[in-house]
Amino acid sequence: LSFDAIDLKGGLEMSLFRDSDHFRQIAKTRQQALNLVKQLNDEVDRRMKILDRAGVTNIWALDRQPTKKILIIDEFAEITNDETKEKVNRLLRLARFCGIYVVIATQRPTVNILPGRAKANLTTRISFRLPTSTDSSVILDNPEASNLPKIPGRGIYKVNENIVFQAPYISEGRVKDIVSYNNTNESCQQEQSDSEPTEEQEKQDNEVIRIC
């Protein structure tokens, strides 16, 4: 699993995750954003050729699956370049079946920022409380987000129906701890997978839970 991000506010929102072993790159400028979505579109084309040669329609049918990739776009409203928008829309249409997923975030849910053709390809939507029913309708196709109580973290998760949820508060310090733990845990798992266990080690593994 690998992450890429577009954060045109100087990379500030994603700075907490830049040391994660899973993060590949963070695009901080419009040119970097365009280059990144071009790279991902090229990867989609490459994977589609692999699917075609294998005679399957998605990566889950492959014996050896490629790395799953997630593109996070923080504040989609900042993407103003038409070419970048078009390439993001293409990813929304095609990339999911190739194991590449797009997460879009915005604080300005308007039809200009999130047009219908882009929204139609967002299979899952999440909204916190919004000031107007119009804003809510842009994301959820209904006014429910404007009716949420003024409780921090209360939101609506929509796939086929609206599900009200309560998100926990996670401090910046906690995020850094989680990133550090995941990096350490990944390294530990890699070291274990690189060495064949002895018969004695396998016996010990059956007797106790070893925590790395």
Image (cartoon, helix red, strand yellow):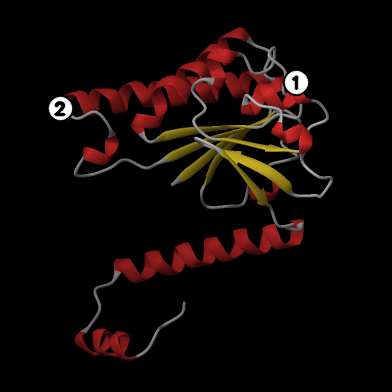
- Sequence-wise, the earlier of marks 2 and 1 is 2
Can you see residue 29?
no
Q: Nearer the viewer, mark 2 or mark 1?
A: 1
Q: Residues within 10 Å of mark 1 (few under 14, many from 20)?
A: some
Q: Residue at x 54, y 62 (%)?
A: 182
Q: How many marks?
A: 2
* Residue at left offset 81%, top offset 50%: 151
SS label for mark 1:
helix
Please give left or right for residue 93 compared with residue 180 in the image. Answer: left
Image coordinates for residue 194, horizontal then vertical, percent: 30, 66
Secondary structure under tag 2 reads: loop
| Residue at (42, 33) in percent of width and height | 100
The residue nearer to you, when weighing 114 against 84, is 114
Determine which of the numbered discs, if any, sits on residue 55 in the image: 2
Marks 2 and 1, how far apart at CA: 44 Å
Instruction: Please give left or right for residue 186 compared with residue 178 in the image.
Output: left
Quarter of the figure with residue 61: top left
Badge 2: how crowded within 10 Å, few (<14), some, or many (20+)?
Answer: few
Going by the numbered disc 2, the residue's amino acid type is Gly
The one of 131 and 69 positioned closer to us in this rendering? 131
Residue 44, position as x, y percentages in the image: 37, 25
Q: Is residue 27 left or right of residue 210?
A: right
Give how far across and how far down residue 94 sits, in percent.
39, 22
Residue occupied by mark 1: 134
Farthest residue toward the top? Answer: 82
20 relative to 10, above or below: below
